[in-house]
Image: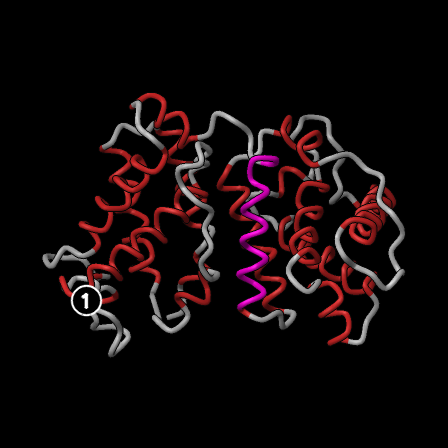
Amino acid sequence: MISYFVLFALFCFCRSQDSLCDKYSQALNVSNKGLVTKVVNDVVGRIVAPKALTKKYFDGTKPSGSTNFTDPSNSDALKDLVTSLVQFFGSALDCSDGTISPYTGPTMDKVHQPMGINSPEFIFFNDQVVGVLAAAGVTEQDQVAVRIVLNGLKPQIVAQNTICDRYSNALKVSNKDLVKGVVLKVFTRITDPNGSPIRKYFDGTKPRGSLNFLNPKNSNALDGLVHGLTTWFGAALGCNDDTIPPYGGPPLDVVHKIMKINEVEFNFFNTQVLQVLLTSGVAKKDLQAISMALNSTKSQIVTA
């Protein structure tokens, strides 16, 4: 299952405009193979961490009986698999210095559709890839390009019958109408003047001089904010009917780093999302999955 995560990490890394693979190889004075191998290893380190949503795809838990790549006794298997993936990048993904030989492995949908990967796991992995690239000095513009490509791979990776699709079908509404309705209800809660500790992030109070989304004069900006939240949650909830475009905004840490959001405020927001979903009839199991996805963003949002 490691192929899912590493394959599309480097798909986006090398496939972006002007070949990011060659661009950063030249900037860092390393070969394509050296660069891609480092990205693979850094991403793997994050997604097999003890509390990572994706660890179960590497430790033999899912699918049942699969290889435990975290077991030192399987180090040769991990090495061979990573080597084959690095070869894939050279032949298919614009790494052009000749240091990576051709890849001949299976397509992503053939490998990953039977795995039962859900949208929270998909989003979690995307966040780890962008985090690795950011730590390596990749520009914010290139990070956004990477995320757009990653999101475009969703139909090949995320299993069908997702949370979003199930509730859209049950309520006979489009994914967009479903998610936008949730976003608007959440927004009403988090901007409530009577008790919301995070209203200040939307009314221009914090950071000082920021935009007041609650001023009717800024209705276009508010529409843009709602759109951004709808696309992000659409990806997180596994929306597949094409009524919601992929999230194309900046990484969450870039958006929130100047806000100095604390843990209490982070938990308040998550609680409002879950309360809206609970009162809308979302099942307990689905709420737990969504809660895990929300909590996985803590390191990107909480900076106070």
Q: Position of residue 174 (x, y in %)?
A: 34, 31
**Does dot 1 land on a helix, a strand or a loop?**
loop
Towards the viewer: 223 or 138: 223
Residue closest to the far left: 194
Tell me: 69 left or right of 149.
right
Give the residue displayed 24% in from the left and 60% down from the top.
Answer: 220
Classified by dominant secondary structure, the portion drawn in magenta counts as helix
Residue closest to the far front: 18
Quadrant position of residue 32: bottom right
Residue identifier under label 1: 203
Quadrant for the C terminus, please. bottom left
Please say if 116 is above or below 96: above
Q: Position of residue 13 (x, y in %)?
A: 67, 58
Residue 38 shows in this picture: yes
Please say if 188 is above or below 277: below
Q: Position of residue 127 (x, y in %)?
A: 54, 54
Q: Is residue 146 magenta?
A: yes
Q: Position of residue 237 (x, y in %)?
A: 42, 38
Towards the viewer: 137 or 58: 137
Q: Which residues are magenta?
A: 141-157
